[in-house]
Amino acid sequence: MKRLFVAVAVAALAFSVNSSAQHFDNTRFGVTAGVTSSSTKIKEVDTKSISMYHAGLAVEIPLGAGFALQPELLYQVKGMALNNWGSSTTGDIGKSFETKVGFVEVPIQLQWGPDLVAFRPYGFVEPFIGYQISANGKGEAKSFNDQLQKMEYGMSLGAGLDIWKIQVSAKYFWNFGSVYKSDISKTGSTIGGILDGNNFNGFAISAAIFF
C-alpha cells in the first residue's frame, strides 16, 4: 500500500508539471466542507463510527484530456469509539472509550471525467497527509491521547460531480500506519490490551463552492 501511495503522489505531481499554461488559466478556487465518518475495526469488541466534520480550501486545476488536479487544505476530524468493553473478571464491562482527533490535512485529488458542458461527473484517487493539532477523548481515551501519532497519511477513492460552481463528492479513505506511537497493549490496562493500533478508516461526503 505504501508503494501505491507513493506512485499516485508522483503521478499527480507529473500531471501538474506537464500541464499547459492554457489549462492553468481555468484554475478555480473555492471553499469546501462536509461530514466525515470514521472508525477502527477491532475483533470481538462493539465498535461504532463517529460522525464529525471537515472544512477548508480547494483549488481545481484542469489538466486536459478529462483530467484535473485538486489540492485541498482541510481541518479534518476523525476518531473511534468502543462500547461495552472490559473484562467480566474485573467488573468493568459497560465502560466507553471515545477519541476525536483533529488534523490539518492536505489531500490531492487526481480526477478524471468527461466534460458534458452542463456538468462533469468524475472519479478520483486521492493520497493525503495530515498533522494532528488536537485530541479529545472520553473515558479511558484521555490517558491514551498523548500516545497518538502526530502524522497521518493514506489514500482515498471516490467520485464527484461538478455543476457550474458547485461540486459534490463522496469518498472512502484508508489511513495507513498506526494510531499510536508505541505498543499500547503493554500498558497493562484492559483497554490497552484490546486496541490493536489500526488507524482511522471511513467515508466522507463533501460540498464545495468555486469562484
Image (cartoon, grey):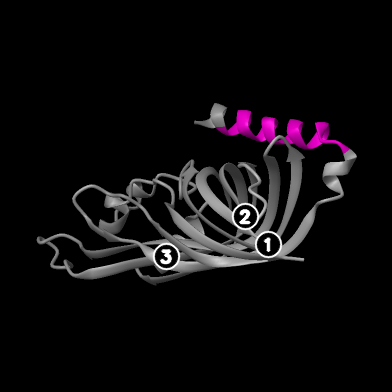
- Residue 32, position as x, y percentages in the image: 64, 65
Horizontal relation, residue 191 to residue 153: left or right = left
- The residue that label 2 is drawn on is 119
Q: Which residues are magenta?
A: 5-20
Depth order, front residue of 115/20: 115
Q: Looking at the image, is mark 3 or mark 1 nearer the viewer?
A: 1
Residue 98 spot, x, y in % from top left: 37, 67
Question: Is the Cβ of the residue at disc 1 closer than 8 Å to that at disc 2?
Answer: no
Discs 2, 3 touching: Cβ within 8 Å: no
Given the image, on which type of amino acid does mark 2 rest?
Answer: Phe
Residue corresponding to mark 1: 164
* Element class at badge 2: loop
- Assess whether residue 156 is covered by the magenta stretch: no
The disc, 2 or 3, on the residue closer to the chain's N-terminal end is 3
| Quadrant of image for the C terminus | bottom right
How many residues crowd around disc 1 within 10 Å: few (fewer than 14), some, or many (20 or more)?
few
Residue 55 visible? The answer is no
Residue visible at 39% across and 65% down? Answer: 50
* Residue at the outermost left position: 89
> Which is nearer the eye, 32 or 136?
32
Q: Give the spatial CA distance, label 1 vs label 2.
A: 7 Å
Main secondary structure of the magenta stretch:
helix
Farthest residue in the front direction?
A: 117
The CA distance from mark 3 to mark 1 is: 38 Å
